[in-house]
Image (cartoon, rainbow, N blue to C red):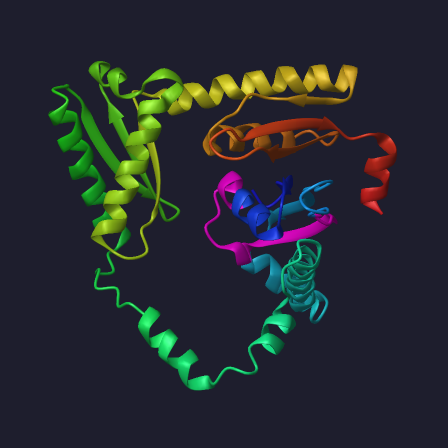
Amino acid sequence: MEHVEIEVRARSIDLAIEAAMQELGIDDPDRLEVKVIQEPTKGFLGIGAQDGVFRIKPRPARKERRRRRGSKKGRGNGQEQKDRQNRQQARAESGKNGGGRSRNDRKDGDRGRSEEPKKAEKKENKVADDRPVLSIEEQARIAKEFLEGLVEAYGLEGTVTTRVEDDVIVADVSGEQTEALVGVRGSVRAAIHEITRTVLQRHGQDAARLRLDIAGYAERRRQALTIYAEQLIEQLMEEGGEIVLEPMSPADRKVIHDVAAKHPGVTSYSEGEPPRRYVVLSRIEDDTATGEEE
Protein backbone atom coordinates (compact mmCIF):
# COMPACT_ATOMS: atom_id res chain seq x y z
CA MET A 1 0.00 0.00 0.00
CA GLU A 2 2.87 2.39 0.74
CA HIS A 3 4.12 2.09 -2.88
CA VAL A 4 0.78 3.00 -4.47
CA GLU A 5 0.83 6.42 -6.11
CA ILE A 6 -2.13 7.94 -7.95
CA GLU A 7 -2.74 11.08 -9.93
CA VAL A 8 -5.83 13.09 -9.10
CA ARG A 9 -7.30 15.96 -11.13
CA ALA A 10 -9.44 18.29 -9.07
CA ARG A 11 -10.45 21.95 -8.71
CA SER A 12 -8.49 22.34 -5.48
CA ILE A 13 -5.95 20.48 -3.37
CA ASP A 14 -8.58 19.85 -0.68
CA LEU A 15 -10.85 18.08 -3.18
CA ALA A 16 -7.85 16.13 -4.48
CA ILE A 17 -6.92 14.97 -0.97
CA GLU A 18 -10.54 14.01 -0.26
CA ALA A 19 -10.71 11.97 -3.47
CA ALA A 20 -7.36 10.29 -2.74
CA MET A 21 -8.52 9.34 0.76
CA GLN A 22 -11.48 7.51 -0.78
CA GLU A 23 -9.37 5.89 -3.49
CA LEU A 24 -6.67 4.65 -1.10
CA GLY A 25 -8.93 3.83 1.85
CA ILE A 26 -7.20 6.31 4.19
CA ASP A 27 -9.17 8.35 6.72
CA ASP A 28 -6.39 10.74 7.85
CA PRO A 29 -5.13 13.39 5.37
CA ASP A 30 -1.85 13.69 7.30
CA ARG A 31 -1.01 10.15 6.13
CA LEU A 32 -0.80 11.34 2.52
CA GLU A 33 2.13 12.82 0.62
CA VAL A 34 1.00 15.36 -1.98
CA LYS A 35 3.00 16.60 -4.96
CA VAL A 36 1.53 19.41 -7.05
CA ILE A 37 2.08 18.66 -10.75
CA GLN A 38 -0.14 21.44 -12.12
CA GLU A 39 -1.81 24.27 -10.23
CA PRO A 40 -5.61 24.56 -10.65
CA THR A 41 -6.85 27.72 -12.41
CA LYS A 42 -10.30 29.30 -12.27
CA GLY A 43 -9.99 31.28 -15.49
CA PHE A 44 -11.91 34.50 -16.07
CA LEU A 45 -15.61 34.33 -15.17
CA GLY A 46 -15.35 30.55 -15.32
CA ILE A 47 -13.92 30.56 -18.86
CA GLY A 48 -10.66 28.69 -19.37
CA ALA A 49 -10.76 27.02 -15.96
CA GLN A 50 -8.48 24.01 -15.55
CA ASP A 51 -8.29 21.36 -12.86
CA GLY A 52 -5.07 20.94 -10.97
CA VAL A 53 -3.06 17.75 -11.20
CA PHE A 54 -1.78 16.23 -7.97
CA ARG A 55 0.30 13.12 -7.40
CA ILE A 56 -0.62 11.54 -4.08
CA LYS A 57 0.64 8.49 -2.22
CA PRO A 58 0.48 7.14 1.37
CA ARG A 59 3.22 8.14 3.75
CA PRO A 60 5.67 5.40 4.79
CA ALA A 61 4.95 3.61 8.05
CA ARG A 62 6.20 5.24 11.23
CA LYS A 63 8.84 2.60 11.79
CA GLU A 64 10.36 3.26 8.40
CA ARG A 65 10.38 7.00 9.02
CA ARG A 66 12.21 6.43 12.29
CA ARG A 67 14.84 4.33 10.53
CA ARG A 68 15.35 7.07 7.98
CA ARG A 69 15.70 9.66 10.73
CA GLY A 70 18.33 7.47 12.35
CA SER A 71 20.33 7.19 9.15
CA LYS A 72 19.96 10.83 8.13
CA LYS A 73 18.93 13.28 10.84
CA GLY A 74 15.86 15.39 10.21
CA ARG A 75 14.94 13.77 6.91
CA GLY A 76 11.48 12.61 8.04
CA ASN A 77 10.57 16.00 9.55
CA GLY A 78 11.86 17.81 6.46
CA GLN A 79 9.65 15.74 4.16
CA GLU A 80 6.58 16.35 6.31
CA GLN A 81 7.30 20.10 6.31
CA LYS A 82 7.80 20.08 2.53
CA ASP A 83 4.44 18.31 2.00
CA ARG A 84 2.74 20.75 4.33
CA GLN A 85 4.25 23.70 2.43
CA ASN A 86 3.10 22.19 -0.88
CA ARG A 87 -0.49 21.94 0.38
CA GLN A 88 -0.40 25.48 1.76
CA GLN A 89 1.06 26.84 -1.48
CA ALA A 90 -1.58 25.06 -3.57
CA ARG A 91 -4.37 26.43 -1.38
CA ALA A 92 -2.92 29.94 -1.67
CA GLU A 93 -2.64 29.69 -5.45
CA SER A 94 -6.18 28.34 -5.71
CA GLY A 95 -7.42 31.32 -3.74
CA LYS A 96 -5.59 33.78 -6.06
CA ASN A 97 -6.82 32.18 -9.27
CA GLY A 98 -10.40 31.94 -8.07
CA GLY A 99 -10.61 35.52 -6.84
CA GLY A 100 -10.88 34.29 -3.24
CA ARG A 101 -9.01 35.67 -0.30
CA SER A 102 -5.89 34.12 1.12
CA ARG A 103 -5.38 33.57 4.81
CA ASN A 104 -3.48 36.89 5.12
CA ASP A 105 -6.23 38.72 3.21
CA ARG A 106 -8.85 37.39 5.58
CA LYS A 107 -6.73 38.46 8.51
CA ASP A 108 -6.35 42.02 7.18
CA GLY A 109 -10.04 42.29 6.36
CA ASP A 110 -11.06 41.23 9.83
CA ARG A 111 -8.77 43.57 11.76
CA GLY A 112 -11.58 46.04 12.32
CA ARG A 113 -13.68 43.49 14.13
CA SER A 114 -13.42 43.17 17.85
CA GLU A 115 -12.21 39.98 19.49
CA GLU A 116 -15.28 39.60 21.73
CA PRO A 117 -17.79 38.81 18.92
CA LYS A 118 -15.37 36.17 17.58
CA LYS A 119 -15.22 34.47 20.94
CA ALA A 120 -18.99 34.57 21.19
CA GLU A 121 -19.33 32.97 17.76
CA LYS A 122 -17.02 30.16 18.75
CA LYS A 123 -19.03 29.46 21.88
CA GLU A 124 -22.28 29.41 19.94
CA ASN A 125 -20.96 27.08 17.23
CA LYS A 126 -19.50 24.61 19.70
CA VAL A 127 -21.96 21.76 20.24
CA ALA A 128 -21.22 19.02 22.74
CA ASP A 129 -21.17 15.49 21.34
CA ASP A 130 -22.97 13.27 23.83
CA ARG A 131 -22.41 10.07 21.86
CA PRO A 132 -20.26 7.51 23.70
CA VAL A 133 -16.85 6.38 22.48
CA LEU A 134 -17.23 2.71 21.57
CA SER A 135 -14.52 0.12 21.10
CA ILE A 136 -14.20 -1.37 17.64
CA GLU A 137 -15.37 -4.72 19.02
CA GLU A 138 -18.55 -3.08 20.32
CA GLN A 139 -19.09 -1.42 16.94
CA ALA A 140 -18.66 -4.80 15.23
CA ARG A 141 -21.36 -6.23 17.48
CA ILE A 142 -23.73 -3.36 16.60
CA ALA A 143 -23.09 -3.85 12.88
CA LYS A 144 -23.76 -7.58 13.17
CA GLU A 145 -27.05 -7.08 15.04
CA PHE A 146 -28.22 -4.51 12.50
CA LEU A 147 -27.39 -6.72 9.50
CA GLU A 148 -29.04 -9.74 11.12
CA GLY A 149 -32.18 -7.68 11.67
CA LEU A 150 -32.05 -6.50 8.05
CA VAL A 151 -31.79 -10.05 6.68
CA GLU A 152 -34.70 -11.11 8.90
CA ALA A 153 -36.79 -8.11 7.82
CA TYR A 154 -36.34 -9.16 4.19
CA GLY A 155 -37.52 -12.65 5.09
CA LEU A 156 -34.28 -14.25 3.88
CA GLU A 157 -32.17 -17.05 5.27
CA GLY A 158 -28.60 -16.00 5.81
CA THR A 159 -25.72 -15.83 8.26
CA VAL A 160 -23.91 -12.67 9.38
CA THR A 161 -20.35 -12.76 10.68
CA THR A 162 -18.08 -9.88 11.69
CA ARG A 163 -14.41 -9.64 12.57
CA VAL A 164 -11.79 -6.92 13.05
CA GLU A 165 -8.79 -6.65 10.72
CA ASP A 166 -6.31 -3.77 11.05
CA ASP A 167 -8.86 -1.47 12.74
CA VAL A 168 -11.44 -2.26 10.03
CA ILE A 169 -14.76 -4.02 10.67
CA VAL A 170 -15.17 -6.81 8.11
CA ALA A 171 -18.80 -7.92 7.83
CA ASP A 172 -19.91 -10.87 5.70
CA VAL A 173 -23.50 -11.80 4.88
CA SER A 174 -23.63 -15.31 3.41
CA GLY A 175 -26.37 -17.60 2.14
CA GLU A 176 -27.94 -18.38 -1.24
CA GLN A 177 -30.97 -16.19 -0.61
CA THR A 178 -28.83 -13.19 0.27
CA GLU A 179 -28.07 -12.66 -3.45
CA ALA A 180 -31.22 -10.50 -3.37
CA LEU A 181 -29.28 -7.99 -1.24
CA VAL A 182 -26.58 -7.48 -3.89
CA GLY A 183 -28.51 -5.73 -6.66
CA VAL A 184 -27.36 -4.70 -10.14
CA ARG A 185 -23.57 -4.22 -10.03
CA GLY A 186 -23.75 -4.26 -6.25
CA SER A 187 -26.02 -1.20 -6.01
CA VAL A 188 -28.13 -2.64 -3.16
CA ARG A 189 -25.03 -3.86 -1.34
CA ALA A 190 -23.52 -0.36 -1.60
CA ALA A 191 -26.70 1.16 -0.13
CA ILE A 192 -26.68 -1.33 2.77
CA HIS A 193 -23.02 -0.51 3.38
CA GLU A 194 -23.82 3.21 3.71
CA ILE A 195 -26.81 2.55 5.98
CA THR A 196 -24.71 0.33 8.26
CA ARG A 197 -22.03 3.05 8.48
CA THR A 198 -24.73 5.56 9.43
CA VAL A 199 -25.96 3.24 12.17
CA LEU A 200 -22.45 3.04 13.63
CA GLN A 201 -22.04 6.82 13.49
CA ARG A 202 -25.31 7.35 15.38
CA HIS A 203 -24.35 4.93 18.13
CA GLY A 204 -20.98 6.44 18.96
CA GLN A 205 -18.13 8.76 18.10
CA ASP A 206 -15.24 7.87 15.80
CA ALA A 207 -17.01 5.17 13.81
CA ALA A 208 -14.57 2.58 12.48
CA ARG A 209 -14.13 1.84 8.80
CA LEU A 210 -16.42 -0.88 7.48
CA ARG A 211 -15.92 -3.44 4.71
CA LEU A 212 -19.09 -5.32 3.76
CA ASP A 213 -19.51 -8.33 1.51
CA ILE A 214 -22.80 -10.02 0.65
CA ALA A 215 -23.07 -13.47 -0.96
CA GLY A 216 -19.37 -13.27 -1.92
CA TYR A 217 -20.06 -10.45 -4.41
CA ALA A 218 -17.16 -8.20 -3.36
CA GLU A 219 -14.56 -10.92 -3.90
CA ARG A 220 -16.05 -11.95 -7.25
CA ARG A 221 -16.16 -8.32 -8.33
CA ARG A 222 -12.56 -7.75 -7.27
CA GLN A 223 -11.32 -10.75 -9.25
CA ALA A 224 -13.30 -9.74 -12.34
CA LEU A 225 -12.02 -6.14 -12.18
CA THR A 226 -8.44 -7.35 -11.73
CA ILE A 227 -8.65 -9.45 -14.90
CA TYR A 228 -10.36 -6.58 -16.74
CA ALA A 229 -7.69 -4.08 -15.67
CA GLU A 230 -4.86 -6.41 -16.69
CA GLN A 231 -6.38 -6.76 -20.16
CA LEU A 232 -6.74 -3.00 -20.55
CA ILE A 233 -3.15 -2.40 -19.40
CA GLU A 234 -1.87 -4.96 -21.90
CA GLN A 235 -3.78 -3.12 -24.64
CA LEU A 236 -2.46 0.21 -23.38
CA MET A 237 1.16 -0.93 -23.47
CA GLU A 238 0.74 -2.03 -27.09
CA GLU A 239 -1.18 0.98 -28.41
CA GLY A 240 -0.22 3.79 -26.01
CA GLY A 241 -2.44 6.78 -25.20
CA GLU A 242 -5.10 6.69 -22.50
CA ILE A 243 -8.09 4.49 -21.67
CA VAL A 244 -11.11 5.98 -19.91
CA LEU A 245 -13.13 3.51 -17.84
CA GLU A 246 -16.81 3.70 -16.95
CA PRO A 247 -17.90 5.39 -13.68
CA MET A 248 -17.22 3.18 -10.67
CA SER A 249 -17.60 3.13 -6.92
CA PRO A 250 -14.60 4.09 -4.73
CA ALA A 251 -13.98 0.40 -3.91
CA ASP A 252 -13.93 -0.58 -7.59
CA ARG A 253 -11.67 2.34 -8.51
CA LYS A 254 -9.23 1.29 -5.80
CA VAL A 255 -8.95 -2.17 -7.40
CA ILE A 256 -8.04 -0.57 -10.74
CA HIS A 257 -5.48 1.73 -9.08
CA ASP A 258 -3.91 -1.22 -7.23
CA VAL A 259 -3.52 -3.19 -10.48
CA ALA A 260 -2.07 -0.17 -12.31
CA ALA A 261 0.43 0.41 -9.48
CA LYS A 262 1.99 -3.00 -10.22
CA HIS A 263 2.95 -1.90 -13.74
CA PRO A 264 5.87 0.60 -13.89
CA GLY A 265 4.89 1.88 -17.33
CA VAL A 266 1.31 2.79 -16.38
CA THR A 267 -0.23 5.50 -14.23
CA SER A 268 -3.84 5.97 -13.16
CA TYR A 269 -5.94 8.84 -11.88
CA SER A 270 -9.60 9.62 -11.29
CA GLU A 271 -11.79 12.27 -12.88
CA GLY A 272 -15.41 13.36 -12.70
CA GLU A 273 -17.76 14.18 -9.85
CA PRO A 274 -19.39 11.55 -7.61
CA PRO A 275 -21.30 9.40 -8.26
CA ARG A 276 -20.00 9.42 -11.86
CA ARG A 277 -16.31 9.42 -11.00
CA TYR A 278 -14.16 7.27 -13.26
CA VAL A 279 -10.58 6.03 -13.68
CA VAL A 280 -8.21 6.96 -16.51
CA LEU A 281 -5.33 4.62 -17.35
CA SER A 282 -2.38 6.27 -19.08
CA ARG A 283 0.85 4.91 -20.48
CA ILE A 284 4.01 6.58 -19.19
CA GLU A 285 6.32 7.45 -22.05
CA ASP A 286 10.03 6.74 -21.69
CA ASP A 287 11.11 10.39 -21.46
CA THR A 288 8.45 11.10 -18.81
CA ALA A 289 9.48 8.09 -16.76
CA THR A 290 13.15 9.12 -16.96
CA GLY A 291 12.30 12.62 -15.77
CA GLU A 292 10.48 11.28 -12.74
CA GLU A 293 13.39 9.07 -11.71
CA GLU A 294 15.68 12.06 -11.61
Is 177 on the left-hand or right-hand side of 43? left
Identify the residue at horizontal 59%, vertical 71% (top origin). Answer: 106
Single out the residue that lies furthest toward the right: 287
Is residue 271 shown left or right of residue 206?
right
How many circles with numbers are drawn on the protein?
0
> In the rendering, at what x and y percent does residue 268 appear?
65, 32
The spot of residue 177 in percent (x, y) is: 20, 15
Q: Nearer the viewer, residue 173 or 272?
A: 272
**Image coords of residue 292 (percent x, y):** 81, 43
Q: Residue at x 32, y 18 (%)?
A: 183
250 is higher (above) or lower (below) than 208: above
Q: Quadrant of the N terminus?
A: top right
Query: In which quadrant of the rendered view does residue 146 lie?
Result: top left
In the rendered structure, which segment of residues is drawn in magenta?
A: 21-41
Is 39 left or right of 107, judged from the image as shown? right
Quarter of the view holding residue 86: bottom right
**Residue 60 visible within the image:** no
Residue 91 sits above or below residue 20 on the image? below
Q: Can I make out residue 103 in this image?
A: yes
Q: Please give left or right for residue 156 compared with residue 247 in the image.
A: left
What is the x, y in percent for residue 29? 52, 55
Q: Residue at x 62, y 46 (%)?
A: 57
Q: Does the magenta run of residues contain 284?
A: no
Q: Is residue 95 above or below residue 172?
A: below
Q: Residue at x 28, y 57 (%)?
A: 205
Toward which corner of the image does residue 149 lie, by quadrant? top left
